[in-house]
Amino acid sequence: MTRAAAITTATARFERGEFTRDLAALVAIPSESQTPEGAPHLRAYLDHITPRLRAMGFTTEIIDNPLPGAPPLLLGERIEATELPTILTYGHGDVTRAQTDAWAEGLAPFVLTERGEKLYGRGAADNKVQHLVNLTALESVLATRGHLGFNVKIVLEMGEETGSPGLAETFHRHKARLKSDVLIASDGPRLQPDRPTLFMGSRGGINFDLRVDLRDGAHHSGNWGGLLADPAMILAQALASITDARGQLAIAEWRPTSLTPQVRAALADLPIAEDTGPRIDPDWGEASLTPAERAYGWNSFAILAMTAGVPDAPVNAIAASARATCQLRFVVGTDPTAILPSLRRHLDANGFAQVQIVEMERGFFAATRLDPDHPWVRFATRSLTETTGKPPHILPNLAGSLPNDTFADILGLPTVWVPHSYRACSQHAPNEHVLKYVCRDALAVMAGLFWDIGAGRDLPPRA
């Protein structure tokens, strides 16, 4: 009954191949939330997880989503004693589109494939492996100690990749049921694969289309060129007005004021470049900021896709319309309700009144950030340092977006995320994968953290 024994129990599951087999079973469920074909598999994923939770002593319930047509959620709890601290954990079992035809030869999205140090499969990084690590670590502590020494509540949703529809409404409806002391969950990448990371919030994200619709049908470019306005040219110039040539934001309301000296200090020595990912472009983004400040302390605009005419079979015609799907990732201090109105004013002021802004139905994730000096962050830092022998990288917030605002703002919880992937994992793209040594390391990290919570020493004061 020692900390080391719990860690050994967790890592042995990986070394014996049990963890990989468990992950393969999860990846095999084609739980795409972005396609109609995936809908039946969203409930099936929760049905698959339920027996594992009940074997650990959880009571579970799969509930209907409060929003019609949105996927179900699983709520569970294991209560050992009311006077013990209660940890809320979270995961999402849905995945992005499979993109089956774009995967490398011999790989398939819903078949876990091992190649060298990598395990390939859709959800292998986002997010199936991450909550599997945490559940396996809980099982290992329970098997070693005979009890956890704390209470656990869990939320598994199946719509995170479509904006977590109904999650906020579920939390409002079940706020008392989900009352806890802290959220400890996993999503996103480590800053560097060989060293744990903690982050305490996320950038927000809002997606929208910019459209230029000028007429019905395309018209011959010889007969009508120079006479008809070209929607693609108009849209391209409108897009170019949003940033300068190096991507610096031109809209005042999109430039945050929350990059304080304290945040800058927290980001000061964090490494960004890594051998396994694409080369960072040093001349892109806000010129006065470091790469870490651009990724974690600033807002970034991206054009995700754009089209006019028929790109795969162009013809000599002026298109009738053009469209670009865009995104703004934003940090705390940016008013999400002002993002699109300020864009509208900017476009009108620059002569692009004919450019329409079409907001996505999925809405946006809000931005959140917890003080890196919070007691739960300090506790987790000590635990991860003891397990790995080196302090974790600590980020005020993730560069990506998560429904962290539902935990922080609705449930009022401090939020501590311990990610188990790495930035070059091809998340949301073909050939998604997780590194095997990160899985093993993550199992040790989480078994140690859960053991330390159950030991009850130096725990933060209860709310």
Image (tube, rainbow, N blue to C red):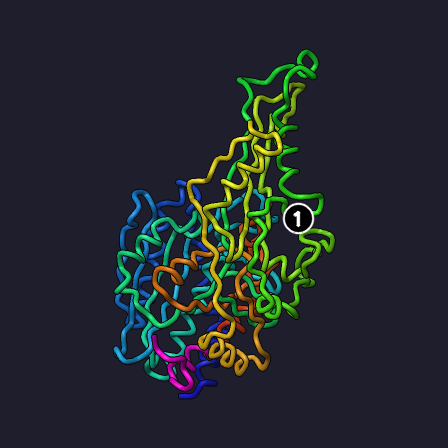
Q: Which amino acid does label 1 sit on?
A: Gln
The answer to whether residue 450 is magenta is: yes
Going by the image, does 234 lie left or right of 98?
right
Going by the image, does 347 lie left or right of 148?
right
Comparing 165 with 234, the one in front is: 234
**Residue 150 spot, x, y in % from top left:** 33, 78
Q: Residue at x 55, y 67 (%)?
A: 395
Q: What stretch is highlighted in magenta?
A: 449-463
Quadrant containing the C terminus in the rendered view: bottom left
Q: Residue at x 59, y 32 (%)?
A: 307
| Image position of 213 with respect to 128: above or below | above
Mark 1 surroundings within 10 Å by alpha-carbon count, few (fewer than 14), some (14 through 19), many (20 or more): some
Residue 114 in view (yes/no)? no
Going by the image, does 11 lie left or right of 175?
right
Quadrant containing the N terminus in the rendered view: bottom left
Quadrant of residue 345 within the rendered picture: top right
Residue 260 in view (yes/no)? yes
Q: Quick one: SS at disc 1?
A: loop
- Which residue was labeled with disc 1? 248
Comparing 180 with 153, the one in front is: 180
The answer to whether residue 155 is magenta is: no
**Residue 349 spot, x, y in % from top left:** 59, 34
Comparing 162 with 416, the one in front is: 416
